[in-house]
Amino acid sequence: MKRRALVTGGSGAIGAAICRRLAGDGFEVIVHANRHLDAAKALAEEIGGAAVAFDVCDAAATHEALDALIESSPIQVVVNNAGIHDDAAFPGMRREQWQHVIDVSLNGFFNVTQPLVMPMARTRWGRILTITSVAAQLGNRGQTNYAAAKGALHSASRSLAREIGSRGVTVNCVSPGIIATQMSAESFDAAAIERLVPLRRAGSPEDVAGVVAFLASDAAGYITGQIIPVNGGMV
């Protein structure tokens, strides 16, 4: 029987690359979206998976959707990829900007992962993977909210790894730097990338997906509680 993987934010550039790679590695992939369900459905059809839509900030809706998904069999790989940024200099940051970024990344991690942990642990094999950011380690101007959320995910993942390692479940973060997506194109031009990145180029979504795929594999069974950088040497 195929192992099942859920990728939140699976309709975005990095999420889609992760979905394609995991499907290619033999997982049954569930592509999550919030507003972009049509894109998730199209990707699911492409890779032979399934699509699901819910708001990770809505605990009740998330729990209801996950209960339906694991009714027949557990999800053994969860990739917490859903996240947003809403940048502003901290003195002018609105409370809503702070709260929404925290809600999606950090509270979304709890809302999605917590209901899946025990069903996963009962199989004695599982992978909890969270996409964070180099901003959590370096900081970034105008992204105090984003860096706070991603840094908290590093701490939460390290703690969770200690709690459930004895059940055969590993917990790790993948921390991308500047990845060639529409989001990064709005923030970093070619000159900035050459200045900031020792490899002098942006990474690709597939670079992130390759690391996720390794951590989701049996070969990575002795790696847990780690923050794996994919940043071209920025840190």
Image (tube, helix red, strand yellow):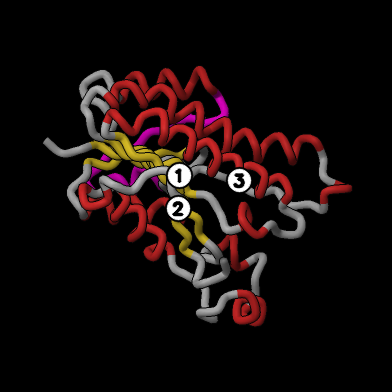
Q: Is residue 165 visible?
A: yes
Q: Which residue is mark 1?
A: 130
Q: Residue 151: which disc?
A: 3
Q: Nearer the viewer, mark 1 or mark 3?
A: 3
Looking at the image, which is closer to me, 155 or 55? Answer: 155
Looking at the image, which is closer to me, 168 or 15? Answer: 168
- Using a 10 Å C-alpha cutoff, classify the residue at mark 3 as few (fewer than 14 neighbours), some (14 to 19) or many (20 or more): some
Q: Which residue is mark 2?
A: 174
Q: Is residue 49 magenta?
A: yes
Q: Is residue 198 magenta?
A: no
Residue at point 18% right, 48% down?
Answer: 26
Q: Which residues are magenta?
A: 39-58
Reading the chain from its start, which is encountered first: label 1 or label 3? 1
- Label 1 and label 3: CA atoms lie apart by 11 Å
- Using a 10 Å C-alpha cutoff, classify the residue at mark 1 as few (fewer than 14 neighbours), some (14 to 19) or many (20 or more): many
Q: Is residue 111 left or right of residue 210?
A: right
* Horizontal and vertical percent position of residue 138: 65, 60
- Label 3 and label 2: CA atoms lie apart by 12 Å
* Horizontal and vertical percent position of residue 88: 79, 52
Above/below status of 21 relative to 33: below
Q: Give the residue furthest to the left.
A: 1
Label 3 SS: helix
Residue at point 34% right, 39% down?
Answer: 170
Looking at the image, which is closer to me, 64 or 176? Answer: 176
Q: Amino acid at mark 3?
A: Gly
Say if mark 2 contacts mark 1, CB within 8 Å: yes
